[in-house]
Image: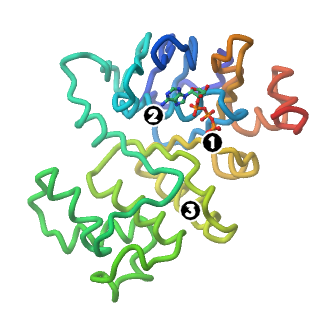
Amino acid sequence: MTSQTPNNSEVIIHVQDLSIYYSAFRAVKNVNLEILRNKITAIIGPSGCGKSTVLRSFNRMNDFVQGAHIEGKILFHGQDIYDPAIDPVQVRQMIGMVFQRPNPFPKSIYENIAWGARINGYKGNMDDLVENTLQSAALWDEVKNDLKKSALALSGGQQQRLCIARALAVKPEIILMDEPCSALDPIATLKIEDLMRTLSEKYTIIIVTHNMQQAGRASDYTAFFTMDDDRAGLMVEYGDTSQIFTRPRDKRTEDYITGRFG
Ligand SMILES: Nc1ncnc2c1ncn2[C@@H]1O[C@H](COP(=O)(O)OP(=O)(O)OP(=O)(O)O)[C@@H](O)[C@H]1O
């Protein structure tokens, strides 16, 4: 691994020799990566190189895919999240996820936030929680008079910010974002990118994106993945986003970011 991570930042996730399989097929191999706290890390690379697979392994979403399993370790604050003693539900509470297509529940805006919190046993003032998380997701001003309205009546960008608010409501430390803007127009996309920057003051964000301008604009660190001859994804290079985009060390990274491949 080519790592430029400054050693004064706290590592929140250590990925050690990670390989991920779908039954016998090794989709990702031998990844070593350190994710830094309160930073935005982008995972980029050509289609099929395993970006989503890696992202989903960080909160055990691959557990839902029959035959999916990993080798190696993913340590969250030094704790192996695949240790049999660990409850995957708790992992997903601490490491939340936002998906490609906004997927609010077919319920009111209010209930989209309150539901997860209630299931998690939240005992505080629900109105305050709803307001605070909608504020954190930069959505409050747009919806404060419509909290009883269906979430499905919101625009795509608003729905995605609601999904971010919903993820925040259960107090995670990390937010995984899998192509969160691919269904959004450019203005809604920029709003989400601004929001990511604000959220990184309190949270750690890992984003998979096809959009290289987005990775360049919105992330602090970038991991570039590609596919090997055996179709397994591997990490080619990882470092400061400006270095990856202006002075890539590996020819494969350079070819990808200059558009010669991918
Ligand atoms: N549920 C699954 N079952 C079997 N194979 C899968 C599954 N999900 C992904 N794969 C395979 O794993 C490899 C990596 O897929 P993944 O979706 O992680 O790549 P990606 O880089 O995120 O792709 P894209 O940019 O197109 O979304 C591909 O070969 C894909 O076909």
- For label 1, the residue is 220
Residue 56: mark: 2
Dot 2 alpha-carbon crowd within 10 angstroms: few under 14, some 14 to 19, many 20 or more: some
Type of residue at label 2? Arg
- Do the numbered discs 3 and 2 sit on residues whose CB atoms are within 8 Å? no
Given residues 1 and 176, the one toward you in this image is 176
Q: How far apart are marks 3 and 2 (CA)?
A: 20 Å
Foreground disc of the pair 3, 2: 2
Q: In this view, does 14 lie to the left or right of 257?
A: left
Q: Distance between the residues labelled 3 and 1?
A: 16 Å
Residue at image coords 11%, 52%: 121
Given residues 174 and 97, the one toward you in this image is 97
Type of residue at label 1? Asp
- Do the numbered discs 2 and 1 sit on residues whose CB atoms are within 8 Å? no
Q: How far apart are marks 2 and 1 (CA)?
A: 20 Å
The quadrant where ligand 1 appears is top right
* Quadrant (top left, top right, bottom left, bottom right) of the C terminus: top right
Residue at image coords 49%, 72%: 158
Q: How many marks?
A: 3
- For label 3, the residue is 192
Q: In this view, does 226 lie above or below 159?
A: above
Name the quadrant containing residue 230: top right
Instruction: Say if disc 2 is inside 8 Å of ligand 1.
Output: yes
Q: In this view, does 32 lie above or below 160?
A: above
